[in-house]
Image (tube, rainbow, N blue to C red):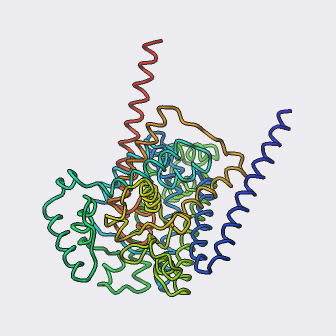
Amino acid sequence: MRGGNLNMEEKRNAMWAYLITGAMILISLLYWATDVYYMYMVIYIWFGFAYGMMLQYGRFCFASASRDLIAAGVPRMAVGIMVALIFFSFIQATLESVNMSTFHAAPFGIHMLISGAVFGVGMCLAGGCASGSLYKVGEGNMTSLLAVIFGLCLGQAIFVDTGGVFNNLMPQAWVDKAMQTQAGMLQAGINLPVNSWFDYYLAGYIWHQPSFTIAKLISGGHPTAIHFFVGNAFINAMLPALIILTLIYFFYPRKNFMKKRKKEMKKAGKEPVTGFSDEMAGIWAMITSSKRTSWMGILVGITAGLHILTMAGIQKKFGVTNFGALLKRMGHFSDVSLKGEVFDPGYWYITSQEGQLGAWILEKFGWNMHDNIFFGFVNGLPEPIRNPALWMSLGIIFGAMVMARLSNEFKFKLPSTELIIWGVSGGILMGFGSRPSLGCNIGGFFIRAAGGDPNGWGYGVGMIGGGFIGGTFLNWFTERRMRQQMADF
């Protein structure tokens, strides 16, 4: 009887997987039938769908990588992320070499480290990073849904539009530069909205920070193919990733591996002396210990590269660099910003589009979200059905849902009161930590580190530090509660 119930559950899950996939195909066809320009958005949908399937199958989550490594000494996820980074960096360098990349470096500064730390604390409290929270929503995890709605959506939107007393906390140098920037743009006929603290932060600090990649740095600003491969791929991505893999191996699985290795040598009648080849074998064993995660790391890296190539191709086909230009061609002028653009990263990215959704919701309740730089001047507020990056996030959710259904891992989980608190507070911190850096674990760390931007590692170090703080706090809280329960017992 139990086997029959299981078989029925598998059939039900398969049916849901087919229905969801069919719905995504139907939506794509409707967009294509409406206007060929919407194929630009359909590309985002299906790459999001692919990311979601891979994230769920490989259990890819930066919060899990930090928590598992620090708290449990399990390196599986951290290793998978480094493998993905290595492969993606090579593909990214290849695309840069043939001028088919949409990647752009971010303003350099200490803000990356600080933002990463805030985000790291948040992802540990919420139980998932930005991308991890999305795929867990697809698995039926309602705690992650709370983190996405109240943190990544509403929290971000409120964060960038808050002014008043918070403006008084801004350094005077930022205020002065922001006013100079506003005056300069006014002369050019652009009324730059400078009202919130984040406006002063952007116009008075971020826009005046240098942006560069290692390739540009070592080439004097005129990189060629060799600079992309040596500077961006090898120096900025592969070498640090290999060093991290070596350190993980040395501090975690090496002791047990060498113990087992020497035991095998003794059993074979050999002198139990290990050397360099044994160390290499140990690192390889660590990488291949979870083939599922390692293969998904490779596929994630390749898919992220294909995403960039496809976006660069369709931009060249339509003669644009931003989807906002296509929206204007279709007559949707209210969707775009003062720059005539919408948020359109051109590659895998999370958080900004969730902030747009939050701002769109708040505007429906009368909150003016166009009176700030982030939405009003830079990213715009397109209708959700015309927001390409938002569709990528939805694609991640639905892709993960399909994979979870096919793997019989979908389970609708309502959160307890405690998990509601952790989910909302963690989501808010993730939203706050992703804005000053203009990116999260994907856009702030993974994409930038692989693309040759040293900012990525600044954010990554902060994220690991924040993850350690968040994980330590959760362990302390859990142990404290258990002691209280035992005392009551």
Question: Which quadrant: the N terminus?
Answer: top right
Give the left or right position of residue 25, taking residue 111 as reference. Answer: right
Place of residue 313 in the rendered image (x, y in percent of width and height, measured from the top left): 55, 83
Residue in front for this viewpoint, 279 or 308: 308
Which residue is rendered at x = 60% and y = 59% of the image? 296
State which quadrant residue 210 falls in: bottom left
Which residue is rendered at x = 77% and y = 52% of the image? 14
Q: How many marks?
A: 0
Residue 242 visible in this rendered orientation of the protein: no
Give the left or right position of residue 111, taking residue 42 as reference. Answer: left
Residue 372 visible in this rendered orientation of the protein: yes
Residue in front for this viewpoint, 446 or 104: 104
Which residue is rendered at x = 29% and y = 54% of the image? 162
Residue furthest toward the front? Answer: 366
State which quadrant residue 167 falls in: bottom left
Place of residue 227 in the rendered image (x, y in percent of width and height, measured from the top left): 39, 82
Place of residue 212 in the rendered image (x, y in percent of width and height, measured from the top left): 32, 75
Residue in front for this viewpoint, 220 or 52: 52
Place of residue 65 in the rendered image (x, y in percent of width and height, measured from the top left): 48, 49
121, above or below 52, in the image: above
Give the left or right position of residue 143, taking residue 217 as reference. Answer: right
Which residue is rendered at x = 49% and y = 31% of the image? 417
